[in-house]
Amino acid sequence: MRKMIKPCGLHCIKVKHLGVTLGQQVILEDINLHIHCGSLNVVVGRNGAGKSTFIRAVLGETPHTGTIEFKDRENGRIQKLKMGYVPQSLNIEKQTPVSVYDMIASYHSNLPVFLVKSRKMQEKILECLNIFEAGYLLDKQVCNLSGGELQRVLLSMAIMDSPNLLLLDEPVSGIDQNGMELFYQTIYQLKVDYDLAIILISHDLDYVKRYADKVILLDKTILRQGNAKEVFQSEEFAEVFQVK
Amino acid sequence: MGMFAWLQYDFMRFAFLAVLIITPLFGLMGTMVVNRKMAFFSDALGHSALTGIAVGVVLGVGNTDFSMAVFAIVFALLLNQISSRVAASTDTVISVFSSCSIAIGLAILSKGGNFSKYSSILVGDILSITPKEILSLVFIFAVTLVFWLFCFNKLLAVSLNRTLAGSRHISAAWMENLFAVLTALTVMASIKWVGILIINALLILPAASARNISENMREYHFFSVLFSMFSGVLGLIISYFVNVATGPAIVILASAIYFTTYVWGRKHNL
């Protein structure tokens, strides 16, 4: 991944009238969003508000209505949007013989990991792991990583082929206070150093207040969006989180 | 000469060849069956062989091997579909369908008191394999190898996280269904030689043993195939000298390897 001197702010992602219906149930409706590169956008809302569904719809996994466009702001040219995704957790048991190399290579290479460990791939993976000071984890078993370590590995994997948009689905479970601070600093650094738009789902309102460029309050649709101060002081926010 | 006296018989030579194909195949497939927690799934598949034969008998199909394979494939795809849709836990769903299908199979095959005709498939007999049947094993082994070379990474990716795999344009449904079909074919091609009762052990034990001592995918596959082939070949030879059924001899050895690796892995903190 190439480091940018400064975020250009010239690309944007436009989500227009996005909606998701599962069976008879409307999960999301009429979501309109405008996201700039180099910005950290945090989605907040109560449980079951459709936050994870929103991420999955943007990824294209959940069928949705509406459009997602990725535009060059100068000439309005529509480009292909590359997305990186950091999941909440992995489906992995204790004792599973999958090393960090195996996992990352399985997503990013066609060279069968059960047969060979390619030096080229290894260097590429190390380069990304090193951005998050996780190079020493290369040969560790994924199931033995601590919460913080796993998170850094997943982040490295997500940015491996320079995505334009990074989606993170509450990736801070099982992490202590120090780890949280480190995580938000890392995310902040990512957005400053690389030409990257970030959408993050979070429950940690204190950190959101300090780090988010834009807060999106979601409950089936977008109730309110804007900077942290605006959203946190809004009536809608008070209603959802029952603060007085 | 004494040690290799068994090789002078044709049936032993064919059985030896069959073991040399079946065991690495099972060692390979087993790694993913265990990783994806599909032990119960493959067990149910093995049991569905009876139903497949029954369906063949009812439809008047001359070659019940064919109806068995087709039924297993349909059964595997159905189980995949249903467990991804029904809210009940996967093992409950598999159990319901598996019991239902075995009951139907047993009912049909036992009609008129004829079940003893089919009971040989419960234990299996590798000594009765013919060169033509060995060829069909070679074919399935080749297909599996190609699938493994081209799709293993994707299969692993899907098993770790479906959404993450989707974000890398890997189709989870395709991979899962292909793997289920391949497992069905492998199990059906070998079931007459290994037997319904122990075929799952052959699929699970080598991979489970390899897990005890492996830290990455290369070690995992190497040990799984090694353990599988070792217990297969040695089991065949022992069964010849001790005069017991080959399948159980192989599984007893594979179990011994499992317990040994378990203790070894514990001791070395793997």
Image (cartoon, coloured by chain):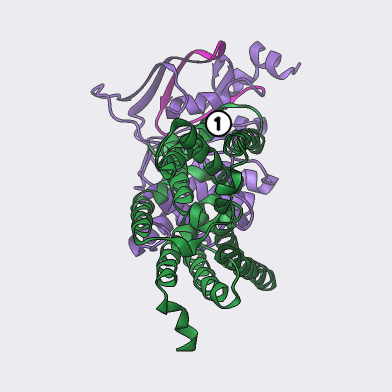
Residue A29 painted magenta: yes
Q: Secondary structure at mark 1?
A: helix
Residue displayed at 51% across by 47% down: A154
Residue B4: percent from the left, percent from the top?
A: 45, 83
How many marks overall? 1
Residue displayed at 56% across by 27% down: B85
- Chain letter, green: B
Q: Is residue A52 visible?
A: yes
Q: Is A62 located above or below residue B261 in the figure?
A: above
Out of A26 and A150, give the one closest to the viewer: A26
**Label 1 sits on what residue type?**
Ser
In the image: residue A225, left or right of residue A83: right
- Magenta-drawn segment: A23-46
Out of A226 and A63, give the one closest to the viewer: A63
Residue at the extreme right: A244
Circle 1 packing at 10 Å, graded few (<14), some (14-19), many (20+), is few
Please state, as top left, top right, bottom left or bottom right, where the C terminus of chain B lies in the image: bottom right
Please state, as top left, top right, bottom left or bottom right, where the N terminus of chain B lies in the image: bottom left
Q: Is A28 located above or below residue B184 in the figure?
A: above
Out of B182 and B3, give the one closest to the viewer: B3
Residue B230 painted magenta: no
Residue at the extreme bottom: B1
Residue A46: percent from the left, percent from the top?
A: 66, 22
- Chain letter, purple: A
In the image: residue A172, left or right of residue A28: right
Residue displayed at 69% across by 71% down: B263
Out of B83 and A105, give the one closest to the viewer: B83
Residue displayed at 47% across by 67% down: B222
Q: Give the residue at mark 1.
A: B84
Q: Quadrant of residue A80?
A: top left
Residue B48: percent from the left, percent from the top?
A: 55, 41
> Which subunit holds the residue at mark 1?
B
